[in-house]
Image: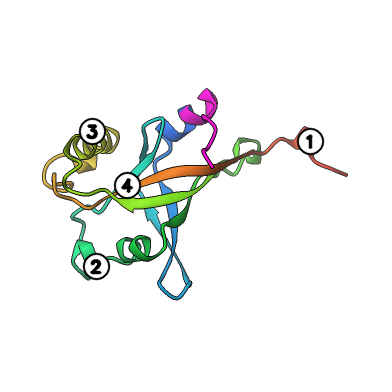
């Protein structure tokens, strides 16, 4: 199943959203969720394993191992404020893959966009050989808080 194109208003929110939560399943089906930095290029979502301190080597990080055993993932991008009229989320369900080193052009493009969105990635924090995850959406759900539509 191919996901429909996202509405321009959703794409605008995704461009400014700073964090998402990536949910994966481990080899025995236990859920694992972590906050991630991401970009959306109009077709796929990308997130990378940066050089912030980790307990294990990048290739051994749980989300990478999990994606290699179960490609189905969920990515939740949301916005919270005390003013609930401004709440929203976008839930993406899709298939993830670790982008191979041989996909040089795709990797370079995604890493360049990640560095542009997150100034913290400038320099050595996001190297050219960083593990890169691509998520191809299969289903996307959007929600906004709209009080006029609330039931009584």
Mark sitting earlier along the chain (2/4): 4
Reading the image, the residue beneath label 1 is 149
**Dot 2, how many residues are within 10 Å of its Cα: few (below 14), some (14-19), or many (20+)?**
few
* Quadrant in the picture for residue 40: top left
> Quarter holding the C terminus?
top right
Residue 137, image x, y percentages: 47, 42
Q: Nearer the viewer, mark 1 or mark 3?
A: 3
Residue 102, image x, y percentages: 16, 45
Residue drawn at x 55%, y 43% as measured from the top left: 139
Pick out the residue farthest to the front.
Answer: 1
**Dot 4, how many residues are within 10 Å of its Cα: few (below 14), some (14-19), or many (20+)?**
many
Reading the image, the residue beneath label 2 is 60
Mark sitting earlier along the chain (2/3): 2
Is 50 located above or below residue 66 in the figure? above
Label 3 sits on a secondary structure element that is helix
Whether residue 86 sits left or right of residue 57 in the image: it is: right
- Badge 1 vs badge 3, beta-carbon distance below 8 Å: no
Residue drawn at x 22%, y 70% as measured from the top left: 55
> Quarter holding the N terminus?
top right
What is the C-alpha distance between the residues marked 2 and 4?
A: 16 Å
Reading the image, the residue beneath label 3 is 109
What is the C-alpha distance between the residues marked 2 and 3?
A: 24 Å
Reading the image, the residue beneath label 4 is 47
């Amino acid at each position: 199943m191919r996901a429909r194109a996202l509405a321009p208003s959703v794409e605008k929110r995704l461009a400014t959203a700073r964090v998402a939560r990536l949910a994966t399943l481990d080899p025995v089906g236990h859920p694992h969720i972590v906050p991630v930095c991401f970009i959306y290029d109009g077709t796929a979502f990308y997130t990378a394993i940066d050089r912030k301190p980790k307990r294990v080597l990048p290739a051994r990080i749980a989300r990478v191992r999990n994606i290699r055993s179960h490609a189905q993932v969920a990515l939740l991008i949301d916005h919270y404020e005390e003013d609930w009229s401004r709440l929203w989320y976008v839930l993406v369900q899709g298939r993830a893959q670790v982008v191979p080193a041989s996909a040089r052009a795709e990797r370079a493009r995604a890493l360049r966009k990640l560095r542009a969105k997150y100034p913290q990635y400038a320099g050595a924090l996001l190297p050219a050989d960083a593990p890169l995850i691509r998520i191809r959406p299969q289903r996307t759900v959007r929600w906004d808080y709209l009080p006029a539509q609330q039931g009584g």
